[in-house]
Image: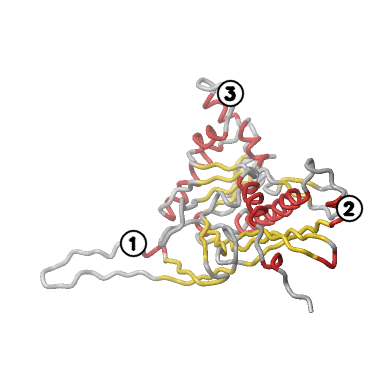
């Protein structure tokens, strides 16, 4: 009877190091750069959520002699997370390795980078599905870009009559009035960024102090949003052997939100990401393995990630779509 060997049970540290280094240098991906990550020991568990309204009212009253002070209190509810394990592998056949031009080609390295990018794309798509879309946030009704402004609409930012500075100021103040927190993070697709760089209102603001070139930092300053991210992740949605169909996964949309600088008890945030660090041998809920598939005469390189992306503050996000033409 076949039994697992040592390589079956071993997390490959050299390959893991290659994978982690690649992940840290993948600037186009932002799934790990917005909401705080919470390391968790168990795959699933419960956590508490405080009722925000209890902390924004006063029950204090004048106190007469020999009377009790006015009473107050707060309530909590429970929610739960489930860190599903996502996995992908590539098999490196003995014959292919023996026929490889070395050291120019390194199949173990290339296989590690391939499955790592695959997992990064899976994680990014999960982030988009959970956070970057319509009917997810209640900070304000989803805002639509159009040729002319109407209810829950704004003029698209690549049109000459657009006013993105006023748009963002209004949305930020609306969120602050409802939650006590002003948004601190903006995520915009690459095409939205391209449109904003040529926005007439921006150019007018900087024409006497700059050389007419709008950088990301300058746009963040003009919009009064401390952190602006421009993910440029692309996906080939075609099946293998079909003609490529590659496009941006963030499209022409944007998300304005409040993201806690770090996780903590009673720390509000639009979202949190739970990472199952108790997953054996994992680094931030991810691990890389290499083991023998003797019946295939090949070595298998396998990547796994265990996480759950939770929206924990629906009123701390505002979604905008069709932001440019």
> On the image, numbered disc 1 is attached to which residue?
57
Residue 277 location (% of width, % of height):
55, 63
Q: Is residue 11 above or below residue 33?
A: below
Q: Which residue is mark 2?
A: 241
Q: Position of residue 96 (x, y in %)?
A: 86, 52
Element on which disc 1 rests: loop
Say which residue appears at 67% left-offset and 44% top-offset: 252
The correct choice, above or below, for 193 with respect to 181 in the image is above
Q: Earlier in the sequence, mark 1 or mark 2?
A: 1
Number of other residues with Cα within 10 Å of mark 3, as a class: few under 14, some 14 to 19, many 20 or more = some
In the image, residue 20 lies at what x, y percent? 62, 51
Binning the other alpha carbons within 10 Å of mark 2 as few (below 14), some (14 to 19) or many (20 upward) gives few
- Residue 67, position as x, y percentages in the image: 15, 72
Q: Nearer the viewer, mark 1 or mark 2?
A: 2
225 or 124: which is nearer to us?
124
The label shown at residue 212 is 3
Q: Quadrant of residue 281?
A: bottom right
Could you tell me which residue is drawn at 61 percent across and 32 percent down?
197
Name the mark nearer the viewer: 1 or 3: 3
């Amino acid at each position: 009877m076949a039994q697992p060997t040592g390589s079956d049970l071993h997390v490959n540290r050299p390959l893991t190091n290659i994978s982690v280094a690649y992940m840290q240098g993948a600037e186009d991906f932002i799934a790990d750069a917005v909401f705080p990550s919470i390391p968790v020991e168990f795959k699933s568990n419960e956590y508490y959520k405080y009722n925000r309204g209890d902390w924004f009212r006063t029950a204090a009253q004048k106190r007469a002699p020999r009377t009790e002070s006015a009473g107050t209190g707060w309530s909590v509810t429970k929610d739960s997370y489930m860190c599903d394990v996502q996995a992908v592998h590539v098999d490196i056949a003995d014959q292919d390795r023996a026929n490889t031009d070395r050291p120019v080609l390194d199949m173990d390295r290339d296989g590690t980078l391939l499955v790592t990018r695959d997992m990064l794309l899976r994680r990014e798509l999960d982030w988009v599905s959970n956070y970057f879309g319509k009917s997810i946030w209640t900070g304000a009704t989803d805002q639509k870009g159009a040729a002319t402004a109407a209810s829950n609409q704004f003029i698209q930012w690549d049109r000459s009559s657009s006013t993105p500075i006023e748009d963002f100021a209004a949305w930020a103040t609306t969120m602050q009035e409802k939650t006590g927190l002003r948004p601190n993070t903006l995520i915009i697709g690459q095409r939205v960024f391209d449109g904003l760089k040529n926005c007439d209102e921006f150019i007018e603001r900087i024409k006497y102090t700059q050389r007419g070139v709008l950088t990301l930092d300058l746009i963040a300053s003009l919009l009064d949003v401390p952190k602006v991210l421009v993910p440029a992740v692309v996906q080939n949605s075609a099946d293998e052997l079909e003609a490529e169909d590659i496009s941006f996964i963030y499209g022409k949309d944007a998300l304005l939100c409040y993201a806690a600088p770090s996780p903590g008890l009673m720390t509000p945030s639009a979202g949190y990401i739970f990472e199952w660090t108790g997953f054996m041998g994992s680094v931030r809920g991810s691990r890389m393995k290499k083991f023998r598939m003797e019946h295939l005469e090949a070595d298998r390189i396998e990547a796994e990630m265990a996480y759950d992306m939770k929206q924990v503050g629906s009123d701390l996000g505002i979604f905008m779509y069709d932001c440019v033409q």
